[in-house]
């Protein structure tokens, strides 16, 4: 699929933001006053900016409001609702921490639960799509999204050692996901013959392109990336997502510059991984994009 910048920003920043909320709701870091304001500001900024970025991928961003009405059938709608619920749940919790110097554990735990559910709904927007085999892997994709959020949240919360091990776990799971996606797409039972119903007469091939002009479907659902380039980007993403920041966090003192360096590496790596997440997602409509 076309790796639009808006969805890359959305999945990268919102995951980090709601991941930080998960830790803040559990009392990590346990701060009040101005320090609490700083951490909650970061969590809200990442989450809100990410959600706003997602609307730019719509044909008409004003229609984003209608997404909330389809919660019975749409994971997109469920995600929007849960994101708002999470942000509003953390508002009084943050006010108590910042202005009153008090912690309401029940409210924090509830907010953490909502943040976990929000990330799950985001992952299910992709995991439930049977037309994109690399995404249609439950529970692998939801677990990957959750682990990204938890690890990134731990990193932003300043839990250096815990974040280091979690980031290594994310890296391993990401590699497993890439391998599982490769295997699933290679053994895909759908082809031009099964899609058209003509396979029983022999091998079906395209004499002409399935589309004679550009269309929204082809622009958004088909993106070609060379296997050689994909492998290089996977290697770069693996190093930046987990290997480099994990080494920094586990081997160096947990000072502010060290954590900031690990955060920078991880965020760049996650953005690269998200680009691959969309660029390598071969939609089945792509089989009609060219002759063969």
Image (cartoon, rainbow, N blue to C red):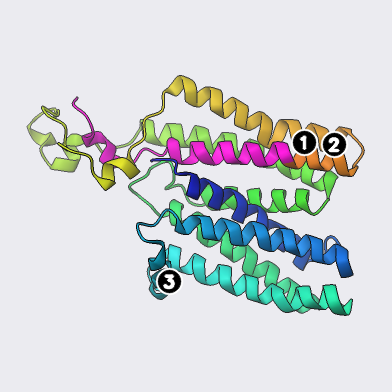
Q: Is 175 situated left or right of 107 in this image?
A: left
Image quarter in which the N terminus is found: top left
Check the picture and name the quadrant holding the C terminus: top left
Cα separation between marks 2 and 1: 6 Å
**Which residue is more in the foreground, 282 or 214?**
214
Task: Give how far across and how far down residue 167 sits, in percent.
Answer: 72, 41
* Residue located 45% across and 55% down the image: 56
* Residue 31 visible to an observer of this rendering: no
Task: Sort mark 2 into few (<14), some (14-19) or many (20+) by Cα contacts within 10 Å.
Answer: some
| Image location of residue 28, percent across then percent down | 83, 61
- Coordinates of residue 214 in the picture (x, y in percent): 22, 40
| Helix, strand or loop status at disc 2 | helix
The residue depicted at 54 percent of the width and 41 percent of the height is 274
Q: Residue 235: percent from the left, percent from the top?
A: 60, 25
- Mark 3 or 1: the one toward you: 3
| Picture quadrant where residue 254 is located | top right
Marks 3 and 2 sit apart, C-alpha to C-alpha, by 44 Å
* The disc label shown at residue 65, or none: 3
Reply yes or no: does residue 277 show up in magenta: yes
Figure quadrant of residue 170: top right
**Label 3, label 1: how many angstroms apart (C-alpha)?**
40 Å
Which residue is denoted by mark 2 in the rendering? Answer: 250
Q: Nearer the viewer, mark 3 or mark 2?
A: 3
Disc nearer the start of the sequence (3/1): 3
Are the residues tagged 3 and 1 within 8 Å (C-beta)?
Answer: no
Choose the circle earlier in sequence order: 3 or 2. Answer: 3
Give the residue pinned by disc 1: 246
- Span highlighted in magenta in the image: 264-292
Label 1 residue SS: helix
């Amino acid at each position: 699929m076309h790796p639009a910048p808006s969805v890359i920003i959305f999945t990268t920043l919102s995951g980090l933001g709601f991941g930080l909320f998960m830790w803040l709701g559990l009392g990590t870091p346990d701060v009040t006053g101005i320090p609490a304001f700083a951490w909650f500001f970061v969590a809200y900024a990442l989450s809100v900016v990410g959600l706003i970025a997602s609307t730019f991928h719509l044909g008409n961003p004003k229609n984003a409001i209608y997404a909330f009405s389809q919660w019975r059938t749409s994971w997109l709608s469920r995600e929007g609702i849960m994101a708002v619920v999470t942000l509003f749940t953390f508002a009084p919790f943050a006010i108590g921490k910042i202005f009153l110097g008090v912690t309401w554990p029940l409210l924090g735990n509830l907010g953490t639960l909502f943040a976990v559910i929000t990330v799950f709904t985001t992952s299910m927007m992709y995991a439930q799509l049977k037309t994109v085999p690399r995404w249609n892997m439950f529970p692998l994709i939801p677990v990957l999204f959750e682990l990204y959020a938890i690890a990134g949240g731990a990193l932003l919360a300043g839990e250096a050692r815990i974040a280091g091990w979690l980031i290594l776990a994310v890296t391993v799971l990401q590699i497993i996901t890439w391998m599982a996606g490769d295997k699933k797409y290679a053994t895909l039972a759908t082809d031009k013959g099964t899609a058209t119903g003509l396979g029983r007469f022999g091998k079906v091939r395209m004499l002409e392109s399935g589309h004679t002009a550009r269309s929204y479907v082809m622009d958004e659902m088909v993106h070609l990336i060379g296997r050689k380039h994909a492998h290089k980007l996977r290697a770069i993403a693996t190093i930046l997502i987990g290997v480099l920041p994990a080494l920094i966090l586990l081997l160096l003192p947990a000072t502010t510059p060290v954590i900031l360096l690990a955060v920078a590496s991880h965020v760049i790596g996650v953005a690269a991984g998200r680009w691959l997440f969309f660029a390598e997602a071969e939609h089945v409509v792509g089989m009609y994009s060219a002759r063969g």
